[in-house]
Image: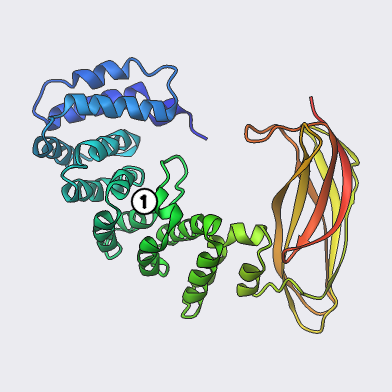
């Protein structure tokens, strides 16, 4: 993962200062030059906000003047990459009152990196008005713009403010996804899948309904788009999502395991277990096999976390077996606690078997 300094360094901000000064017909950009020397200790989001404010301070306060400088900078091939991100955020501030011209400028900026975060203030301020513009982007010849239509309207885009109106009701943005789920670009289709996955977290029935509609007239890429878009529901064992993708929760199988071969594990080591799944039916079985680790908390209760194991078809009578190594290396998103933990297998959403093991945490 790149560091904040690698993404938005002093050198990058200094280069941006020179580019914008030249674009505005000025000798320097004093606020940006000062900010380039005062980035130490700031997180990436802190740097974006600080550089955005410096851009607003250096560029004209009126929208026409501001837009003219940014569009002149766009003609310079050196104006690209992470330096454009805080400029996009400045457009979201200065261009919100102008609205459609502000969105048009983000349309032109997005190919230099992405304007997915900067479109969100427009969608929060006036969803219907913004969506009228965004919907037109789905026909744009540039895949970066088409992706912007899907990614910018995601209800729960990571590292960006949520769109509360779309979290509550994602249906107004569904025409964007309907227009893009068959897109020729994998870059765009991946965004559509992630958007559908966002929807599934709050409105699982609507996500499954949308996926079923797409699958009723599929292309060669539809199944992959849907599978990635319903991944959270699949891991959660939601039967409606599993059934839609051909993974019946009632599939006839026998399961051996998990058989833990490391009954005591220290943080930094691996839990190791064996497993076997046999198709006891007379037809091929489409299986999604996951495993669930039930982490013990400080108060003694347990919380489950589902991890993907494999997806494959088993012929009648065929057995699938293997060994899994699950890492307990320290990570920033989870705190481990000593105590008895559990691991289970999950086959097409149904929990099968369990085994205990002890975890030793510092």
Q: Can residue 221 be spotted in the picture? A: no
Foreground of the two, 238 or 40: 238
Direction bottom: furthest residue: 282
Horizontally, is 302 left or right of 215 in the view?
right
Mark 1: which secondary structure? helix
Callout 1 crowding tier (Cα within 10 Å): few <14, some 14–19, many ≥20: many
Q: Is residue 102 above or below residue 320?
A: above
- Find disc 1 in the rendering and name its residue: 152
Q: Can residue 280 be spotted in the picture? A: yes
Query: Total label count?
Result: 1
Foreground of the two, 4 or 125: 125
| Residue 200 locus on image (x, y percent) | 54, 59
Kindly identify the residue that appears in the image at 52 percent across and 35 percent down.
1
Horizontally, is 140 left or right of 353 in the view?
left
Which image quarter: residue 228?
A: bottom right
Image color mode: rainbow
Horizontally, is 235 left or right of 345 in the view?
left
Q: Is residue 54 above or below residue 161?
A: above
| Residue 137 locus on image (x, y percent) | 27, 60
Which image quarter: residue 19?
A: top left
Kindly identify the residue that appears in the image at 39 percent across and 65 percent down.
174
Kindly identify the residue that appears in the image at 33 percent across and 56 percent down.
149
| Residue 352 locus on image (x, y percent) | 83, 61
Kindly identify the residue that appears in the image at 65 percent across and 73 percent down.
243
| Residue 311 locus on image (x, y percent) | 69, 64
Q: Quadrant of the C terminus?
A: top right
């Amino acid at each position: 993962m790149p560091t904040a300094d690698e993404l938005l360094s002093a050198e990058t901000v200094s280069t941006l200062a020179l580019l914008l000064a030249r674009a505005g017909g000025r000798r320097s950009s004093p606020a940006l030059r000062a900010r380039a020397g005062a980035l130490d200790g700031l997180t990436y989001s802190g740097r974006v906000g600080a550089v955005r404010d410096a851009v607003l301070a250096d560029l004209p306060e009126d929208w026409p003047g501001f837009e003219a400088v940014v569009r002149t900078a766009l003609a310079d091939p050196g104006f690209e990459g992470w330096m454009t991100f805080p400029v996009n955020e400045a457009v979201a501030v200065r261009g919100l009152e102008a609205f459609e011209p502000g969105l048009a400028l983000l349309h032109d900026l997005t190919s230099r990196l992405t304007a997915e975060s900067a479109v969100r203030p427009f969608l929060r301020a006036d969803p219907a008005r913004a969506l009228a513009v965004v919907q037109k982007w789905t026909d744009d010849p540039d895949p970066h713009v088409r992706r912007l239509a899907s990614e910018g309207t995601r209800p729960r885009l990571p590292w960006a403010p949520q769109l509360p109106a779309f979290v509550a009701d994602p249906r107004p943005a569904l025409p964007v996804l309907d227009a893009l789920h068959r897109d020729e670009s994998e870059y765009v289709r991946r965004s559509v899948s992630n958007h559908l996955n966002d929807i599934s977290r709050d409105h699982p029935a609507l996500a499954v309904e949308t996926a079923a509609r797409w699958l009723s007239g599929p292309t060669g890429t539809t199944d992959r788009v849907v599978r990635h878009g319903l991944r959270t529901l699949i891991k959660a064992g939601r039967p409606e999502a599993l059934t839609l993708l051909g993974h019946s929760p009632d599939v006839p199988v026998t399961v051996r395991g998990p058989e833990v071969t490391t009954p005591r594990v220290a943080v930094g080591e691996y839990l190791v277990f064996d497993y076997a799944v046999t198709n006891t039916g007379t037809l091929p079985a489409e299986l999604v096999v996951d495993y669930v680790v039930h982490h013990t908390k400080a108060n003694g209760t347990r919380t489950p976390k589902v991890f993907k194991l494999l997806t494959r078809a088993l012929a009648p009578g065929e057995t699938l077996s293997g060994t899994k190594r699950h890492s307990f290396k320290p990570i920033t998103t989870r705190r481990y606690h000593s105590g008895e933990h559990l691991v289970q297998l999950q086959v097409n959403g149904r929990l099968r078997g369990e085994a205990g093991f002890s975890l030793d945490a510092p």
